[in-house]
Image: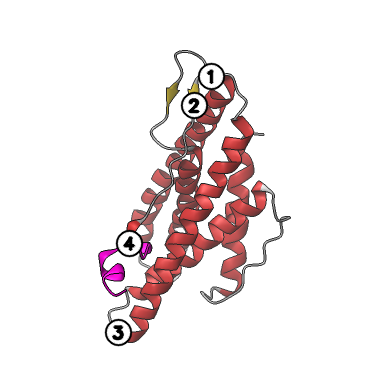
């Protein structure tokens, strides 16, 4: 079983669990043991799923500005949590492959494995919600047809992205590619690098 064959059903599981109650304040109940990659993948997608719904709510043109600001703060925290978890998943790959003998002509990939997995997690959400649109009982046939076309593209993208991720991991394991992990270093979250924050000290 490839990595994406393990990961994608976990993403679907987290999405389904969230939509039982469909509430941005519900508590995650991760079914996997802490310290496993499965646990981290489930939490990763849970964060993505909750943030998906944050983004829906904040776009309500009638939202109270004070409520929108509170939600913006939650989105900021969610983004940081997402980044931290991607870096944790990259640490898993780094540890797994750190003793691989790298070939002399090995190349580096444009993104790390975990950031590619991040895109697969988001893609799982796009597919779930596009399927919802295809099956909407109150939508017109024209709307459903357009969404069905988009869904077909998303499903093809899932196949291509999954293949690319698995090939990347195979190349790293064989020493044909090597990975380097760069921390995101988001300056606006750091009170020592964001001028608006350090000016207030």
The verdict on residue 89 being magenta is no
User: Is tag 3's residue or tag 4's residue first in the polypeptide sequence?
Assistant: 3
Mark 3 vs 2: CB contact within 8 A: no
Which residue is the site of mark 4?
188
Mark 3 vs 1: CB contact within 8 A: no
Determine whether, in the image, residue 110 is placed left or right of residue 135. left
Q: Residue at x 49, y 26 (%)?
A: 178
Above or below: residue 17 compared with residue 65 = above
Above or below: residue 190 compared with residue 99 = below
User: What secondary structure is marked by label 3?
Assistant: helix
Question: On the image, which quarter does residue 94 sit in?
Answer: top right
The circle drawn on residue 65 is: 3
Determine whether, in the image, residue 191 is placed left or right of residue 158. left
Q: Can you see residue 136?
A: no
The circle drawn on residue 27 is: none
> In this view of the protein, which residue sits in the foreground, 4 or 34?
34
Q: Residue at x 38, y 33 (%)?
A: 110
Report the magenta residues as a range: 188-201
Which residue is the site of mark 1?
102
Q: CA distance from mark 2 to mark 1?
A: 7 Å
User: What secondary structure is marked by label 4?
Assistant: helix
Q: Residue at x 63, y 57 (%)?
A: 13
Badge 1 density bin: few <14, some 14–19, many ≥20, Cα 10 Å: some
* Residue 189 locus on image (x, y percent): 37, 63
Which residue is the site of mark 2?
178
Q: CA distance from mark 3 to mark 4?
A: 22 Å
């Amino acid at each position: 079983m490839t990595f994406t064959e393990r990961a994608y059903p976990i993403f679907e599981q987290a999405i389904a669990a969230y939509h039982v109650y469909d509430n941005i304040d519900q508590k995650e109940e991760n079914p996997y043991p802490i310290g496993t990659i499965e646990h981290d993948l489930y939490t990763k997608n849970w964060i993505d799923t909750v943030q998906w719904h944050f983004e829906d709510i904040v776009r309500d043109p009638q939202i109270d500005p004070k409520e929108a600001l509170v939600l913006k703060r939650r989105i900021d925290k969610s983004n940081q949590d997402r980044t931290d978890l991607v870096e944790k998943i990259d640490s898993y790959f780094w540890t797994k492959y750190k003793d691989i003998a790298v070939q002399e002509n090995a190349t580096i990939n444009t993104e790390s494995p975990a950031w590619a997995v991040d895109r697969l997690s988001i893609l799982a959400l796009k597919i779930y919600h596009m399927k919802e649109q295809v099956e909407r009982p109150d939508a017109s046939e024209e709307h459903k047809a357009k969404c069905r076309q988009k869904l077909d593209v998303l499903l093809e993208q899932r196949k291509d992205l999954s293949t690319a991720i698995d090939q990347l991991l195979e190349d790293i394991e064989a020493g044909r590619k090597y990975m380097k992990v760069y921390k995101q270093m988001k300056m606006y979250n750091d009170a020592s690098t964001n001028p608006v924050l350090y000016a207030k000290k």
